Image (tube, rainbow, N blue to C red):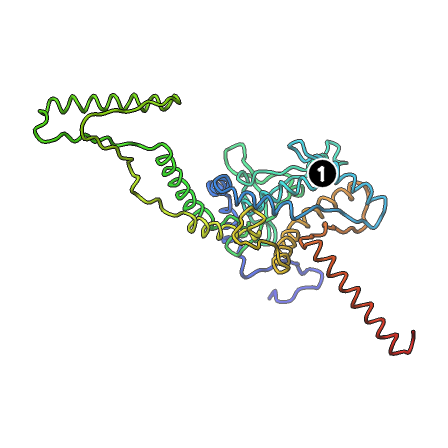
Amino acid sequence: MGFWKRKGTQERAVCTQLRGAGADREMLSAARLGAQGRLYRAVRSAVPAVDAAIGKIIRLVGGVSVVCEEEAAQAGLRQFLRTVPVGRGQVGINAFLDMYLDSMLTFGQAVGEIVLERGREEIAALLCGRVEEIEVRQGATPLEFVICGPGRDGGMDPLPRQELLLFTPYNPEADSPCGVSILRGMPFLAELLGKIYAAMGANWERMGNVRFAVVYKPRSGEMDPAECAERGRQIAREWSRAMESGRDGSVRDFVAIGDVEIKVIGADNQVLDSEAPVRQILEQLVAKTGIPPFMLGLSWSSTERMSAQQADILTSELTAIRRGLTPVVEKICRLWLRLHGWYGGFEVVWDDINLQDQVEEAKAEWYRQQARQIALSCERAERGEE
């Protein structure tokens, strides 16, 4: 009947119920950025505060180092991580992670490549790729994926050496398995902010380079229509000469006979206050990045300083980003160690995140030491010691 099988002939397979092969493959293939990637680049170019926030996050994440079980392996690995070329005239794993994290935050995903020498005995370089030029597909199982690039026939073909590729999604969701950009939700607000700034620029251009309305009102019965028209042309010529002399820096008076009225066009209109709407939009944009406003040069309060709660929240955000980057560093280090014959363990160590005020930390440590000294004095007094 086929219901019974020998113990040694049973096949081991991964069975999933929620991630079907067809649907998930369609979602992963549709994750190619295309126009969405150009939109995210435009947001960073249009809003300096957003671009500065991403740069601050990259720098606050800090540097990374590796601790190995074997001292000889640790010395060689640290030398490699410090001197490995990463393109764009930069060297070192930290420079590679800066570019890698920039792509991950901006586009929601990052892709890189480990380049081997011809003899495949040494890692020659670490390079970041353009996520707009790749496509991610599901592999043989729902737990695997395949990175595809442009093929010779114009389509997207799987890249040949998948084990040398690096891929990291940022905050992947069920409907976005390839990650979500930190700029998601910002294009609409950035468009509104751009319209406000464009209107402000037009208003200031009009107010800075004012237009004048010169009105000549002849009295009833003073002149006939032909003489009025000639008088108007004379006033227009004299006014134009006076304005042209002002452009050259000289002063020329304008003299007219009759009832002549000069007004500034639009001077009686009130310019809309842009401070409140601009601040509301910037608050939404800055809140999305998780960076305190004063770190971006936005002084919205008279007592701008980072509190302990803000520092803890920002530290947790940076730690979450580090968790996404750690597997990339581990894969690079593991390959280097295996190429050089080392099979011991290692640990990725990130620099300490210090966002607190140094003076306040020193005071807190001083108070702790005082409390400890008082406690020891009380213990000695209870034991009857001098």
Question: How far across and how far down the image is residue 253, in percent?
Answer: 30, 24
Q: Residue at x 16, y 21 (%)?
A: 230
In the image, residue 168 sits, relative to residue 217, either above or below, namely: below
Return the residue at label 1. Answer: 92
Question: How far across and how far down the image is residue 42, in percent?
Answer: 48, 40
Q: Residue at x 78, y 68 (%)?
A: 371
In the image, residue 313 sits, relative to residue 237, either above or below, namely: below
Question: How far across and how far down the image is residue 379, in percent?
Answer: 86, 75
Q: How many marks?
A: 1
The quadrant where residue 259 appears: top left
Quadrant where the N terminus is found in the figure:
bottom right
Residue 12 vs residue 28: left or right?
right
Q: Residue at x 81, y 70 (%)?
A: 374
Question: How far across and how far down the image is residue 181, in percent?
Answer: 53, 48
Residue that protrudes farthest toward the right in the picture: 385
Quadrant where the C terminus is found in the figure:
bottom right
Q: Residue at x 50, y 55 (%)?
A: 175
| Residue 366 or residue 53, whichever sits in front | 366
| Residue 1 or residue 317, whichever sits in front | 317
| Residue 268 or residue 287, whichever sits in front | 268
Residue 38 vs residue 246: left or right?
right
| Residue 352 or residue 90, whichever sits in front | 352
In the image, residue 91 sits, relative to residue 369, either above or below, namely: above
Question: In what element is the residue under mark 1?
Answer: loop
